[in-house]
Image (spheres, helix red, strand yellow):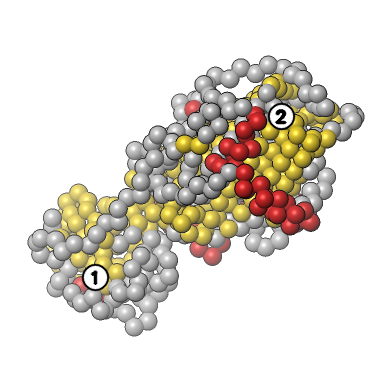
Amino acid sequence: MRRVVALRLQAALATAAIAGTIGMVLPGIQASAASGSATGYATSNGGTTGGSGGQTVRATTGTAIHAALCSRASSSTPITIEVEGTINHGNTSKVSGGSCNTADGVIELKQISNVTIIGVGNGAVFDQLGIHIREAGNIIIQNVTVRNVKKSGSPTSNGGDAIGMESDVRNVWVDHVTLEASGGESEGFDGLFDMKNNTQYVTLSYSILRNSGRGGLIGSSESDLSNGFITFHHNLYENIDSRTPLLRGGIAHIYNNFYINLNESGINSRAGARAKVENNYFKDSKDVLGTFYTDEAGYWQVSGNTFDNVTWSSPGSENNPAGPNPQSNTTVSIPYSYSLDGAGCVPDIVRQTAGANKGLQVSNGNCSPQTPTATPTSPTPTASPTPGGTNLSIGAGSDGSSKGDGTSYGNVRDGDMSTYWSPAGSTGDISIKWGSAKTVSRIIIREASGATGAIGSWQVINGDTGAVLKSGSGAGAITFAPTSLSKITFRIAGSTGTPKVAEFETYAG
């Protein structure tokens, strides 16, 4: 089937602008950990906590995201990665390490667990770059935008999926994200939210999916029936041709979503799938529920839904629409507790809460937005004070990776803020070294004037053993366990612009 969406975009976006006046736009917030807690099936199978309890780092490039994953002690060490800015092909490269398995041109969450990726500050946009979750578990993605990911044309990423999960994935919570394309398959796009090859216990909540031929699928074919236990709630599906979602086998719970301008079909339950569909609002759409494009039947339990200007096709050998008077043909038992908003207010509450940069607001179960009970604030940037004790870098030696023109390794240990070292590119190493071992437990990285904030993710490395003493993001004071060494390295794994290290100070305490 062809999925032709591009010609509808102008009118659809105009409609969205008008519809946006239904509810107020809430201010964006910053968060240093996932705000609120997982809901739906993501709470089953032990729950979904992401990087809770682990280190928090900041990343402004895709390479820095990969570097943060690779800097962990193991592939399961918890980590929260705060993302700000635009992540694209130009700043997303493979990083190698024992705790990661990354690739160029895609955010690769492969063979890892216990990770949160959350947009902060002015927002995080993954532009033409997909997020791939594979052989992974306990993952949270929150408050980000992923747009215009292509499977054909240029550039391509993630098989054309905005967020794709496959191969033994467990417990993923995707919340308050905006996933969008600019057309259908003929324009080079594929699904916005796809799950296949044994993906289970996933929740998609308070998110926007729009302007795409395909909303998403559960199961890549009629024989891929190992997926399921998926919850969709309080999401906006707008100007989508089909697959909201396409469900092959398994169980889905679909409630309190707002569907508008579904052009060909909507929730497509087939190949024995069972969907509990309750208190959703369907508007200006066609064939919003049923089994479509196959003779392998799926099933549904319906209650409390509103069908506003919905049209229905006649039944055929490969089409079994649920309407015009949808009735249940199965029952689905839900193992978790949840609160239902009335369908009549769903357009309003979803418009107010769904998507990135909406303040992470949620419904209180009575059609009113509220802030989640646990909303951390962004950490205060570490200052660069003048500490007590002797700066051990004065009189020491220094070396590093290739340096930029007009800079010197020695400039980081001369006590002069007007001189600096820069790597030849946007990443690189700078080291302080001594003729005999020194005990170091604190360093201060001072950026040159005009370059403040350029340094993104980093690692502090014991130059004698290669051990990572600390990892994080942003320049300033960095403390770690007292370590005896003759060489210490500051490795810049990500940056915005050209990093300039004016001083690399080292202290015993």
Foreground of the two, 243 or 157: 243
Foreground of the two, 391 or 100: 391
Residue drawn 79% across the image and 35% down it: 310
Residue drawn 26% across the image and 67% down it: 446
Splitting the image into 4 quarters, where does residue 276 fall? top right
Splitting the image into 4 quarters, where does residue 218 fall? top right
Vertical arrangement, residue 4 with respect to residue 354, above or below: below
Residue drawn 87% across the image and 33% down it: 313
Image mark for residue 503: 1
Is residue 414 at all visible to an observer of this figure? yes
How many marks overall?
A: 2
Splitting the image into 4 quarters, where does residue 464 fall? bottom left
Q: Secondary structure at mark 1?
A: strand
Residue drawn 55% across the image and 55% down it: 126
| Rendered-image quadrant of the N terminus | top right
In the displayed structure, does residue 102 sit left or right of residue 153? left
Q: Secondary structure at mark 2?
A: strand
Is residue 149 at all visible to an observer of this figure? no
Q: Amino acid at mark 2?
A: Thr
Looking at marks 1 and 2 on the same chain, the residue that comes earlier in the sequence is marked by: 2
Vertical arrangement, residue 478 with respect to residue 266, above or below: below
Say whether marks 1 and 2 touch (CB < 8 Å).
no
Q: CA distance from mark 1 to mark 2?
A: 64 Å
Q: Amino acid at mark 1?
A: Glu
In this view, which residue lies farthest toward the left?
Answer: 389
Q: Which residue is mark 2?
A: 306
- Residue 311 coordinates in the image, percent (x, y): 83, 35
- Residue 458 coordinates in the image, percent (x, y): 35, 58
